[in-house]
Image (cartoon, coloured by chain):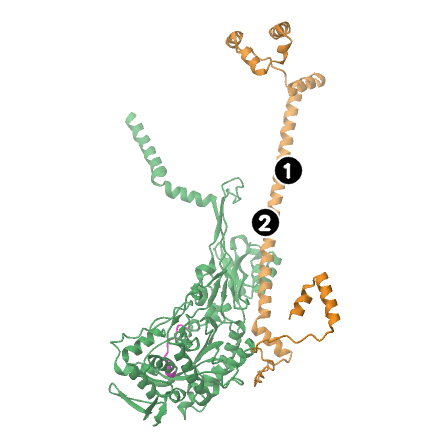
Chain colours: A orange, B green
Amino acid sequence: MARSAGWGVANQQIDEANVLTSTRILTRRRLGPNAAAHASAPPRRRRRTRGFVQVASAVAQERLRVSVFGHAYLGVGAVVICLLFYLAIAAQITQSSYDISRLQQKQSQLLAEQDQLRYQEVTLHAPAQVQQQAAQSGMQRVVPSSYVAGQEVAVDLGAPVGASPADSAPLWQRAVAAFFNAVAGTREVMAATRK
Amino acid sequence: MFVVAMVLAGMVWSRLMYWQVAEHGRLSLAAQQQFRDFEKLPAIRGAVFDRNLTQLVVNTTVYSAFVSPDQITQGRRDTVASALASVLGVDKGSVMTTLSSNVKFAYIARRFAKAKADQLRALKLPGVGLQEEMQRSYLPGAEAGTTLASDLLGFVNWNGDGQSGLEMKYQKLLAGTPGYISSYRDLANNEIVLGTHTNVNPVNGSDLVLTLDANIQFAAEQALAAGIKTDNAESGSVLIMDPSTGGIVAWADYPSYNANDFNHTDPALFKDNVVSYVYEPGSVMKVVTLSGAINAGVIAPDTVINDPGVLSVGGYRIYDWDRRNHGNVDYTYVLAHSLNVGAMKAMLAEGHDAFYKNLQAFGLTQPSGIDVAGETFVPLPSASQMGDSQYATTSFGQGIDVNMVQMLAAVNVVANGGKYAPPHVVDRVGTQINPLLLQPQRQVISPDTAAKMTAMMEQVVQNGSGSLARVPGFQKDQTGKTGSSQIPVNGQYTQDVWTSYVGFLPAQHPRFTMLVVVRKPHYPGSDRDWTLNDGYLTAAPIWKTIAQNIVVNWHITPDPS
């Protein structure tokens, strides 16, 4: 403490500007001629502080004035509590394992039932079942005895398209339509008129 | 004293050495077995679907009941035995015998349904346990007591191994790879939670999507069963193929079996007559013979020959089926009326070597390679080993053994514009398409030859032996060919016959090719007139019935004329 105070006094005496000396320079100074002596000095034993538990137990001991038997009872009590805690945990684990086992069994039963239901569903769609159901309903499959030959199509789809028919609308209507088409820009209408 | 001590110590050391070094492996294994628990995690077997994704096979859970007699007190044995007998329908006496024995474990009943298992579980019987097992369940077939496409699909035994058909052929893919859990257990058989665990998840089997159509399969089974009963035949089979891909649409056998109850089935029924039975195809072979000759340019459909009804070849006199002199006839007539002399003359015009190569090209000298287990194949002698008479009889389908798949694939060449479509049943494995479908098809005959043969086969239906196969509306748009051949026994031909009918429809744009084979028919009245057993009367009507069903199911319309 005295050393650090000395350093402080010296600093105050040197210059006020040195207050802003960087830590790097300070470090270098520490490693200066005085630093060697500081490094070679035997390490001072750090004074131990008493822990909270020690302090608390000491305080509790002092206040409660617990005897040796009291200590023993406390120890036994702690062991019993730990034992009970362990038993509770073990019982919980055992219970959980029983639950898991029961649920696994239930799951396997449900899966078996699902398989069974799937088989029933598939069987219901099977041709044999469908036919049986149809027969019970009085349905009969009709086999076509003849086919009507397709008629020739009236429209000759292979013919060239040719010129589009002349527009019979009056000139003023076409002019109005052209104006609105140009303004509105309706592509569909334009495409239609092109056709 | 020292010596004695050393000897004793040596004995102890040597004994220790024996246990710790010599017996180390065995003892550590025994210890592992005691405290290591190895639980198998079964893989789920892949499902099987038809082309419309109708599920054909379903995995279901069944149960087996077992007892541990040492856990049942003497006083409760009677109660337990009575309960087991009433729920499972087993003999109470035999259960009592088991309970009174010294065995530690015994099955009481195997593989029963969940309903019974639930009843048994509710009774909470001491010393009685239930074991879950997986079972393959198949759809009901057309005939009572059969399952759909049983011969094609096969079945899976209690160990989970496919025993025939697709289940056997695709066993590895369908079964998947089982996983396991390896952990440690204490003396009380409790799992040591903090111990080392090895958990390998199972890899489930792949699903198969077939080219089969369940509706057509059902119709085929139904028509076949009815036809075989009408024909008083021993057995029969139907095979239907998609002409352009070679995919099998239906695969029916009669008699068939119940794959859900395979353990109570006569093993003779497990033989799949479609692929495991070879027969002499008879006149159906003329399609191959004449196609080859037309393709070689040695004959044409309108080539006229003289058919006196008999031909001497290799020292044998070989007759037409009716032993009549037909005079001058063209090859369209030869096929329509199934004349053996015409077929032999076509073969002779083509030459032995070319004819043999033709048989090879049509796939009749090697197995079809179809992806179904148990294909039977009888190799044809080499070209040089075949005598003149065998060449002659082979030209009209006697003296050559084929299975139905080979024969149908050969005729299908005509339907497929001259290309050989490799026959197959599986379209996709999981999401992977069958690689066969990605390969180019082999051109066997020219498209022109195929068209000519198609026209000739149309005449078989319109003017020849295929009249009973005419499908209403398709009379002028379907093809066909009948076949009949005597069955040899100990080298001698008998009066029993194989009869067959093959054809495709519509003629110009075929949607299916179908082959029907009837074995040993005894058509009413055939004892007086053996020709009543012929293919036109026994096999063709079955073909027609099935074809009508396909037309309706697939909405096929005739080609515009």
Residue drawn where x is 63% and y is 11% of the image: A19
The mark found on residue B258 in the picture is none
Decide whether the magenta segment is chiefly helix, strand or loop: loop
Which residue has dot 2 on it?
A101
Part of the protein shown in magenta: B275-283
CA neighbours of label 2 inside 10 A, class few (<14), some (14 to 19), many (20+): few
Q: Are marks 2 and 1 in contact (CB under 8 Å)?
A: no
Q: How many marks?
A: 2
- The image quadrant of residue B89 is bottom right
Residue B232 lies, in percent from the top left, at 45, 85
Type of residue at label 1? Ala
For residue B36, side relative to residue A86 (left or right): left
The quadrant in which residue A94 appears is top right
Amino acid type at image mark 2 = Ser
Toward the viewer: B108 or B427?
A: B427
Image coords of residue B143 (percent x, y)? 52, 76
Q: Position of residue B459 (x, y in %)?
A: 44, 87
- Callout 2: chain: A
Residue beneath label 1, please? A88
Mark 1 surroundings within 10 Å by alpha-carbon count, few (fewer than 14), some (14 through 19), many (20 or more)? few
The residue at the point 64 percent across, 74 percent down is A164
Left or right, B302 with respect to A6, comes to left
